[in-house]
Amino acid sequence: MKKLYSSIKPSVPLLTTTSRAEGLIGCKFQRSSRRNFHQSVSPMKHLHHQTSSPNVLSDECRLLCKIVAFATKGDYHALSDEFQGLLEMNDQIAANAHTHHRQHEEHSKAYHCKILIPMAVELVSQTHVFIGFPKVLNALSAMKKTFIGSSSNDRHHLTRNENDWLHLCTPLDGDLLFKSVFVREELGVEAMKQIYGEKNYLKLVDKTFSLHPILHQLLVTHGYGNVLQNRFHVFLALRELCSVVSLCYSADTTAPQLVAHMKGFSRVYSVDEKDYTIHIKNRNTHTQLGTSDRDLIVKGCLRDAFDLASEIYGKETTQHMGKLWENYETSKYTL
């Protein structure tokens, strides 16, 4: 939490907020859970010993993954708490931007925090392709209620209404929803090739078409041509990482898909992160490992995603982690 706070907090002290906001970014896990996880994931021990910080993921990325995990689990109360904490921080920084003498710096911090809000909404909405519409609709309902009515007693609260929420749900870089089905099919094919690789893409489309042609068409045009797209504010690598977090919830029954998206993250992730809206890895990881240790960084990001999922979903998830890492390392699942 301190790292993200130092990068976006105003230079004047923030007002004390509720305990919900205090746990906003700092995803602190029980040591026993973390120890058990690392013991079951032997390929990751090398990275764990090379970094002084136990977290490879940045605080911003961990927050977004945590929000996705709560939506996937169906813990709408915890989801609302996390989202409200983000809104409170945004309101506080925006208020200070108008009163503090270092306005340029404060506006920069306000933008950095504000961009996380539509990112959180879109990342939750994308999980419908993994967990279905009912949970996601309930999650968005909880987030909308929090967005419009959060912190009404806070003097820094910014009034929000229905139109503000709908604007928040609109893609920031284009009218993708209004593109023709043929354009979405082309975009879907391109995204699938990026995620799975050329050869695996051909095998995947053959398999899905043979299972159900209509679902295959929806998978290509909607799942990948509309949802899992590389956009300005939610880039493809972040989508893949959050897909991993969501699929961890059903690791015992969706292992092939989970490992496929683990490999998908490995394929689309750019270690320099120069075109990313937020950092996926924290600065310490970048400083100590550099861009030459891409494989270690990718595995470290996935390890942290599994670690976070294990904590939120419960210990029953942890038992599948070792086997999944083995499959990831040995390429048992070809996708």
Image (spheres, rainbow, N blue to C red):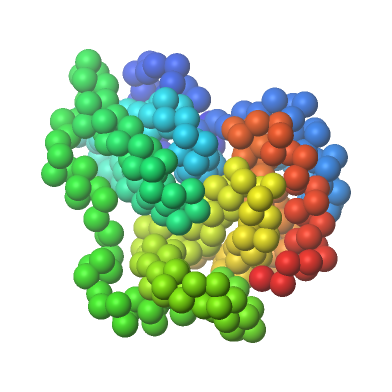
Q: Quadrant of residue 291?
A: bottom right
Residue placed most toward the observer, 273 or 216: 216
Q: Is residue 140 left or right of residue 213?
A: left
Task: Name which residue lies at 17% across and 43% down.
Answer: 164
Q: Quadrant of residue 185?
A: bottom left
Task: Name which residue lies at 77% across and 54% down.
Answer: 325
Q: Quadrant of residue 17?
A: top left
Is 320 located above or below residue 289 in the figure?
above
Residue placed most toward the observer, 36 or 90: 36
Image quadrant holding the C terminus, namely bottom right
- Residue 95 showing in the rendered view: no
Q: Position of residue 255 (x, y in %)?
A: 68, 55
Task: Name which residue lies at 54% across and 54% down.
Answer: 243
Is 64 located above or below residue 325 in the figure?
above
- Residue 309 showing in the rendered view: yes
Residue placed most toward the observer, 100 or 295: 295
Task: Name which residue lies at 62% across and 60% down.
Answer: 257
Is 334 located above or below residue 120 in the figure?
below
Q: Position of residue 155 (x, y in %)?
A: 20, 19
Q: Is residue 59 left or right of residue 223?
A: right
